[in-house]
Amino acid sequence: MKQTNVQKVTDFELVSAIFARNMTLFMKVNSISGNALAATSGIPQKTLWVTMNLKNIPTLDTCKRICDGLDVDMRAMISRTLTEQEVQRTKRVGRVFDTLLTLASEKLSAAREIVEAFAK
C-alpha cells in the first residue's frame, strides 16, 4: 500500500493565516507600508514580512503589538477572514465586545436578540 504524506494544518497555522490576510488587507486598504507599521508597532520589518508571508507563526505578543500599531482589535483580526469593510470596523467591534462582557446575563440575551434582528 502506498503511503501518502499529508501535512495537517494546525489551529495555530490557520489562525496565523487568517491574521496575516487580515493584516495585509488592512494595510493595503489604508496605504500603510511595512516601514510605517514597523515604526508604530516596534516590530522589526523582517518579523512583519515573515508574518505576512506565512513563514512563521507569530506569538500573541507580536500579534498584539502589530494590532496596536494598526489600531485594530486583535480578537477580530484572528477570528475569521474579514472583508474590506469588516477589517475597517475591528476597533469599534472590539469596544462593543468589551461592553457586552460586562452585561448581566439577561441584558446580554436582550442585546443578542437586538443584534440578531439587525443581522437579518
Image: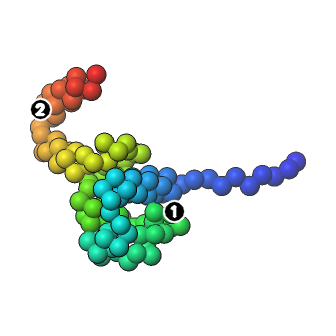
Residue position marked by numbered label 2 in the rendering? 107
Q: Position of residue 33 (x, y in %)?
A: 35, 67
Q: Which tag is nearer the camera, tag 1 or tag 2?
A: 1
Decide: few, some or many residues near mark 1? Use Cα within 10 Å; few <14, some 14-19, many ≥20.
Answer: some
Q: Residue at x 41, y 57 (%)?
A: 24
Q: Residue at x 12, y 32 (%)?
A: 107
Q: Residue at x 44, y 53 (%)?
A: 21
Query: Is residue 75 positioned above or below 57 on the image?
Result: above
Instruction: Tell me the quarter of the picture where residue 108 sits.
Output: top left
Q: Position of residue 31 (x, y in %)?
A: 33, 59
Q: Quadrant of the C terminus?
A: top left
Q: Position of residue 90 (x, y in %)?
A: 26, 49
Q: Residue at x 32, y 48 (%)?
A: 87
Going by the picture, which residue comes out furthest to the right? 1
Drawn side of residue 99 relative to residue 2, left or right: left
Drawn side of residue 6 relative to residue 99, left or right: right
- Give me the disc on residue 54: 1
Q: Amino acid at mark 1?
A: Leu
Q: Secondary structure at mark 1?
A: loop
Instruction: Tell me the quarter of the picture where residue 73 sits.
Output: bottom left
Q: Are marks 1 and 2 in contact (CB under 8 Å)?
A: no
Instruction: Tell me the quarter of the picture where residue 85 sits.
Output: top left
Q: Amino acid at mark 2?
A: Lys
Drawn side of residue 56 relative to residue 101, left or right: right
Q: Secondary structure at mark 2?
A: helix
Q: Is residue 11 visible?
A: no
Q: Position of residue 109 (x, y in %)?
A: 18, 29
